[in-house]
Image: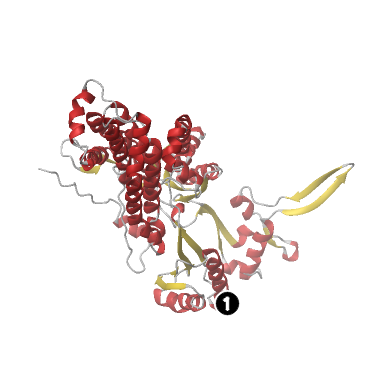
Amino acid sequence: MSITNLAIKYRTSVVVLTLLIMAGGLYSYLTIPKESAPSIEIPTIVVTSIYPGASPDDVESVVTQPIEQEIGGISGIEELRSTSTEGVSSIVVEFTPDVNLDKAYQEVNQAVDRSQSELPDAVEDPSVDEIDTSEFPIMTVNLTASYSLARLKEVAKDLQDKVEGLPSILEANLVGGLTREVRINADLSALSSRGLTLQDLVRTVDQENTNIPGGSIDVGDQSFLVRVDGQFENPADQIENLVVAAPDGKPVYVRDVADVVFGFKDRETYARLQTLQRENAEGAVRPAKTTETRQVISLSVKKRPGDNILDAVENVKETLREADLPSGTGVIVTGDESENVRSLVTDLENNIISGLIFVVAVLLFFMGVRNAVLVGIAIPLSMFTSFIFFQAAGYTFNFIILFSLIIALGMLVDNAVVIVENIYRYHENGYSKLEAARLGTAEVGGAVVAATATTVSVFAPMLFWPGTIGEFMGYMPLTLIVTLTCSGAWGRGGDQSPNQPTTGLAALGGDRGRRVHGTRAGVRQLADAGGAGGGRAAAVLRLREGAQARRRPLHGRGDAAPGGALPELLARHARPRLRPPERAR
């Protein structure tokens, strides 16, 4: 028995199944994780090595080349390129798409370990990192304060621990601020005159600034751990009073052979924030007169792969609201990727609603109320079925899938329009409702399947697009294939009721509907125009609204002259020069 006859025979079951699909699809849509970009594995590994103070030529010869020689023997490498700059070696290893990335990562790590015996002692341990699109920051939390940056750094670290403790957050990288340190400036002549060396001073500080386990003490049926706490609580004062040696019973203190200064580490990162505003008079963007560039401490927040970006950002914001920050602390969130995802989801919802309204309006004019509603149901029903598939398959909602659903919107009603219009023709020729549904669907069922298959086959080759781009863009053909296939299935099994022209607009369209019976393309094209046009209209309106409402970040890059320091670079680029956008005339 064909699917059409089954649907006619078990009409109640079809209605129940439809309601279940609607409910399940709505649940999947609300609960499926959402993110801005697909989470894919990029077969690229980056090896970074730091050689402080070395020139680019030295970095190339004694760091980059030895590591490259070891890595070059790994199989599956497609391209190996490197960059050597002052004090930094960066090696990018690109593998073929079919390589096992976990195995490749281990082999690169082993190669780097083997090369370390040839590297200078001053080279820091190289870092080996994979590139993962899901590990890009989803938001940046900027902290400002009316008190010192050193204290703000401590506040930021406490907040960092709270944010990283959230289940959906992978890490929060801290940038900017001042880090306290104790500097011991040794007086070599004072050491020498007392028969001491610099190593004696270093050894004394190392031995004193440590916690020593003291074993355990059993008291009755209880056991207590013993620890000798030797870490400095007030480093500057305690270090000055340490005894380096006691020749002839006379102690030599650290303060006798060195100056102890409680200061800050040399800064390696800076974070600054400048507020911009739009001037109403000129329409030009320029720095706000009431706000100057401020030094801040930033937390770049990354979520865990597969987690919902909307929930992750909301959890971070809730943590910020509940944080007990000192008076005078300000929090400014920038680079919120959840806003873009939320906008894409809103665009999809607007397109579905507007497309449904346009389709039903066109079909209402030609085919009556009942069949207009039946065909209109094909849009949300196909979408909801797709949502269930995506959640069951473990996919996340990203901008590729959302954009593909918008593209498919105008094509979803094709099958339903053809079938319903043919059922209408049989009913007008005197057949009963059920007989018209059976014969009308059977007559064009093969054509509907063929039309769906040809449309799907156009997108199928894109599933085999090789490389990283293919993995990234593969979500588009998959989405279109699943959605259009669902549309074809529901078109054959779900439209059984012939049109029954009533009064009003449906009656007005009755005669026109009869004139297009021989040309099904007329109704199809008008319905498609309504669906696609509605989607495009909503997209254009949303785009124009977004152009005024959304904030877009400005990214810049500055390179220091050879030998230049970071503060010098910051001074040169302290105030970005912004050019007002061209105004349309």
Q: Secondary structure at mark 1?
A: helix
Q: Position of residue 412 (x, y in %)?
A: 33, 42
Colour scheme of this structure image?
secondary structure
Q: Quadrant of residue 435?
A: top left
Nearest the viewer among 58 and 149 is: 58
Q: How many marks?
A: 1
Extreme-top residue of the structure: 503
Height in image: 565 above or below 277? below
Height in image: 249 above or below 334? below
Instruction: Please tell me how crowded label 1 is: few (under 14), some (14-19), or many (20+) other residues with Cα within 10 Å.
Output: few
Nearest the viewer among 324 and 466 is: 466
Q: Position of residue 226 (x, y in %)?
A: 78, 49
Q: Position of residue 127 (x, y in %)?
A: 51, 65
Where does label 1 land, which residue?
117
In percent of the image, x 72 and y 63: which residue is there? 246
Extreme-right residue of the structure: 220
- Give the residue type that dot 1 points to: Ser
Height in image: 546 above or below 505? below
- Say whether residue 256 is left or right of residue 133: right
- Say whether residue 375 is left or right of residue 306: left
Res 146 seen here: no
Res 522 seen here: yes
Nearest the viewer among 347 and 296 is: 347
Q: Quadrant of residue 61?
A: bottom left
Quadrant housing the C terminus: top left
Q: Quadrant of residue 221?
A: top right
Q: Position of residue 496 (x, y in %)?
A: 37, 33
Extreme-front residue of the structure: 430
